Image (spheres, rainbow, N blue to C red):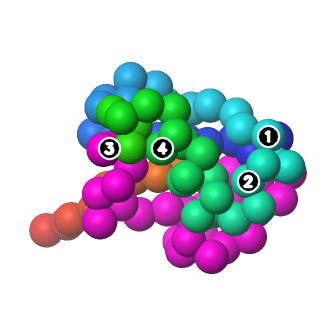
């Protein structure tokens, strides 16, 4: 299983902070995103934003990053500081 976390407004928009996905269906971030977007049109809209950031095991990653059972994937908006 892959643990998927959602933070900030993404969590609010999807009304969930975490879920678990089978690792066998999600070999990389691109496949995981595709499976999440297929849930319904609202998930499609929220997860299609171009500024969406993703981390695998707390390391910033991209759509080609491979996933394995036990990985933790986090989706979050860009963070600004001051």
Identify the residue position indicated by label 4 in the image.
Answer: 37
Q: Is label 1 in a helix, a strand or a loop?
A: loop
Q: Is label 4 in a helix, a strand or a loop?
A: helix
The reply to whether callout 1 and callout 2 are in contact (CB within 8 Å) is: yes
Rendered image: mark on residue 46: 3
Q: Nearer the viewer, residue 14 or 6?
A: 14
The reply to whether callout 4 and callout 1 are in contact (CB within 8 Å) is: no
| C-alpha gap between disc 4 and disc 3 | 8 Å
Query: What residue sits 51% from the left and 32% below the top?
Result: 39
| C-alpha gap between disc 3 and disc 1 | 21 Å
The reply to whether callout 3 and callout 1 are in contact (CB within 8 Å) is: no
| C-alpha gap between disc 1 and disc 2 | 7 Å
Please say if 75 is above or below 80.
above
| C-alpha gap between disc 4 and disc 2 | 13 Å
Precedes in sequence: disc 4 or disc 1 = 1
Query: What residue sits 52% from the left and 40% below the top?
Result: 38
Q: Quadrant of residue 20?
A: top right
Residue 11 makes an appearance in the image:
no
Inspect the magenta stretch and tell me whether residue 46 lies in it.
Answer: yes
Identify the residue position indicated by label 1 in the image.
Answer: 22
Name the main secondary structure of what is drawn in magenta. loop
Inspect the magenta stretch and tell me whether residue 14 lies in it.
Answer: no
The reply to whether callout 4 and callout 3 are in contact (CB within 8 Å) is: no
Rendered image: mark on residue 68: none
Please say if 5 is above or below 55.
above
Identify the residue position indicated by label 2 in the image.
Answer: 26
Precedes in sequence: disc 4 or disc 3 = 4
């Amino acid at each position: 299983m892959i643990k998927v976390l959602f933070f900030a407004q993404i969590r609010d928009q999807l009304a969930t902070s975490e879920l678990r996905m089978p690792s066998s269906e999600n070999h990389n971030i691109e496949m995981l995103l595709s499976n999440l977007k297929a849930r319904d049109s609202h998930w499609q809209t929220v997860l299609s934003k171009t500024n969406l950031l993703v981390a695998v095991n707390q390391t910033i990653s991209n759509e080609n990053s491979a996933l394995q059972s036990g990985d933790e994937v986090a989706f979050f908006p860009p963070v600004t500081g001051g």
